[in-house]
Amino acid sequence: MTASAARTGIVHLAERTPQLAGAEMVAALVPPPQFADATFDTYRADPEFPSQQEAKDLLRAFCGAGQLAKGGFFRKAKRPEVKPGVYLDGGFGVGKTHLLASIYHAMPARRKYFGSFIEYTALVGAMGYQNTVELFRGADLLCIDEFELDDPGDTMVMTRLLAELVSSGTRLAATSNTPPNALGEGRFAAQDFLREIHAMASSFQTIRIDGTDYRHRAVDGHAAVLSAPQYEAAIADAAAAGTASDDTFAQLIAHLAKVHPSRYIRLIEGITAVGLREVEPFTDQSAALRFVAFIDRVYDAELPIRATGVSLDLVFPDEMLSGGYRKKYLRAISRLVASTLA
């Protein structure tokens, strides 16, 4: 590693304290770079899973961008009920976020927003509930990626917000992030919560998408691990071409506890590669869940990860993988494998 690279091309994420004002948070409510040009045409439905093509056709119709195919989802209904929202439920890696971004781009809307569940709840925290309602009132479309069920309080806030917006004409599109061991797949994620959330479920048409994780169709199932010399060379190369981060795994995990997940995107701003030394398995589930949220942002930004220590697909121990957050951890593993091989 050259002295020049050390001075100008390498940063330490553990030393960053990003801030994010309400106006900046609103401006960031657009599809991530990976899906900036996503369309229904670029979504490649797997012919082995007909639900993917059926979902694509249904969502085109939802956007007014096409007609339902003969024999489609509403084939038995002469005058199907049109609900104000669609809810995409399925495993990880089947293209739900791609389809959500396609809805955003295809919908002929004057005002539309795209963000993760965490981003919306953080906005409520920053601006206050009523100010957030007024901000979105009159919006044509809200897209919500990875609808969370981790915090009942946040879930209740979002259901109240969405109910108010639906009543004023806003259309909704969401993807699910249902812990299968807790609530079961194939159902609207909120239906077993409080009465208000159950009522909100009636605003959505649930669309199930089956399939296999596309990230594993052509890659090996383990995250790449580098030796210390290989890591040094990789970070030096990344620093010479752009800006690389370089932190020990323990330092980064400790720092993530001090940064709200909505600011993780700002934490990696300007980074072209992420370096993690001495990766080790998690022993604390809260820390593991924060890392999942961090990896979501890294993956959305299409950043490669270079790491030493334990393979990143092995950081979640068996007791975590067998618990209620299994689906989240498996999605993170999929993304970690793809990112280390990038």
Image (cartoon, helix red, strand yellow):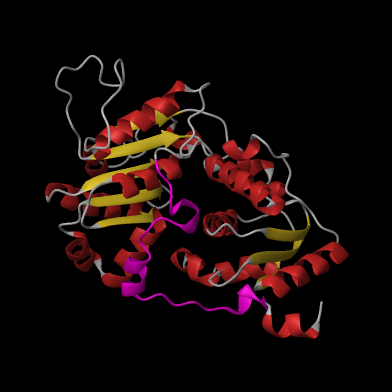
- Compared to residue 269, the image places residue 84 above or below, namely above
Residue 154: image x %, image y %?
34, 55
Quadrant of res 123: bottom left
Left or right, 26 with respect to 265, comes to: left
Residue 47: image x %, image y %?
51, 22
- The residue most toward the front is 41
Residue nearest the observer in this picture, 44 or 180: 44
Q: Inspect this view and state whether residue 127 appears.
A: yes
Residue occupying the point 38% across, 25% down: 54
Left or right, 301 with respect to 227, comes to: left
Q: Is residue 21 magenta?
A: yes
Quadrant of res 280: bottom right
Residue occupying the point 25% across, 21% down: 74
Q: Is residue 333 magenta?
A: no
Residue 145: image x %, image y %?
40, 49
Task: Give the residues drawn in magenta, as a range.
Answer: 10-39
Residue occupying the point 31% across, 73% down: 23
- Compared to residue 182, the image places residue 303 above or below, namely below
Q: Inspect this view and state whether residue 249 appears.
A: no
- Compared to residue 338, the image places residue 183 above or below, namely above
Residue occupying the point 29% across, 17% down: 70
Residue 7: image x %, image y %?
71, 85
* Number of marks drawn: 0
Left or right, 155 with respect to 91, comes to: left
